[in-house]
Amino acid sequence: MRAVFRFSGVLKSGRRAVAAALLALPLPGLAQSVLPAPLAAAPLSSAAAPGRIGHWPATTRRWEPAAASPLFTTTDSSTLSRRLPLLAGGLAVTYTGLLYVLDQGWYTGERSQFHWFNDLPEWKQLDKAGHFWGAFHESRGAVDMLRWAGVPDRRALWYGGLVGFVLQSPIEYFDGHDPAYGASATDLAANFLGSAGLMAQQLAWNEVRLMPKYSFHTTRYAKLRPNVLGKSLGEQYLKDYNGHTYWVCADLAAWLKPESRWPKWLQPAVGYGAQQMVFNDRDANAALGLHAYRQYYLSFDVNLMRIPTRSKLLKRVFYVASIFHLPAPALEYNSQRGFVMHGLYY
């Protein structure tokens, strides 16, 4: 019976999403006071384009830092000595405070000995996609912040690239001591893969060409189990996996020649979601006439980082908004209805 009523994946998603929002989204705003987007896609050229960490020259495999640019005029020793302590201190205080709030405010029940729980079969792995997405963008923001603080390019990548994994993983420690949950090895793996995904793209292409994104829509399933899937819109945004879709959007222009007529802001996207997930147990779901199934999508997305603007405010907005998939036409495939065309999907 425990499996029927277990909903740790949803509650853990809420904690993870709160942590991601607090720890990742503020980073770009500060970084954008100096940089529009160090990890954002930029036009290809033989030299490092503005915003790249560096490049591999065609004649050698030796790493070279990004070419000098007005975007990176703050990376001198005086900047490093001023900004790095400020950044490190601010993050340490914020993160320590967040962990304390989680420990004292969220984990208020009985504590148990540390234990593991295999939640991989739950929620059609959408919670794992969320862990990947969160860790990726936390690492992305951290690399940008380290560059803003004056840390050399390659160190910023290696140190900042691990931040997503480091930020999200302690939540598993708390879950491991909660008798209702349990630490998840697959959550840790998803955290690691998210950070590794950011670092791998930077090492391979010196930019982000495959951007993980997220979109949400309300569903009729939340009201069937509001204590788990959410009562308010804000709770459903975090907890109702039926309304979650995770995307990978490809910056196609980065692979095309500069003279290509393909709009640089337009990128193809593939998405993944699932429906009819009220209970993880099949029998409990079937009692409601529901049978959970996966959904796959083909769509397009707008690469906001490719939209030229001189406004620092818009650059900050575009940076933060680039983690979300914007509403667009989409072709869906699922095992129950086959192909379904959506005029506007989000």
Image: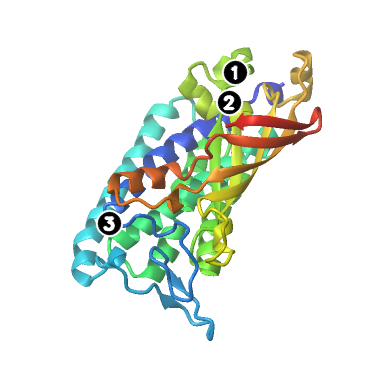
Viewer-side residue, 313 vs 27: 313
| Mark 2 element type | loop
Q: Residue at horizontal 50%, vertical 77%? A: 56
- The three-letter amino acid code for the residue at tag 3 is Val
Frontmost of labels 1 and 3 is 3
Q: In which quarter of the image is the C terminus?
A: top right
Which residue is most to the bottom? 59
Whether residue 248 appears in this view of the structure is: yes
Residue topped by disc 3: 34
Whether residue 184 appears in this view of the structure is: no
Q: What x and y, as percent, mark residue 247?
A: 60, 43
Q: Which of marks 2 and 1 is nearer the N terminus?
A: 1
- The three-letter amino acid code for the residue at tag 2 is Asp
- Contact (Cβ within 8 Å) of mark 2 with mark 1: yes
Q: Earlier in the sequence, mark 1 or mark 3?
A: 3
Colour treatment of the image:
rainbow
Per the model, the C-alpha gap separating discs 1 and 3 is 42 Å
Q: Quadrant of the N terminus?
A: top right
| Mark 3 element type | loop
| Mark 1 element type | helix
Residue topped by disc 2: 240
Q: Residue at horizontal 50%, vertical 42%? A: 173
330 lies left or right of 94:
right
Per the model, the C-alpha gap separating discs 2 and 3 is 37 Å
175 lies left or right of 30:
right
Q: Earlier in the sequence, mark 2 or mark 3?
A: 3
- Contact (Cβ within 8 Å) of mark 1 with mark 3: no
Residue topped by disc 1: 222
Viewer-side residue, 118 vs 75: 75
Q: Residue at horizontal 53%, vertical 23%? A: 236
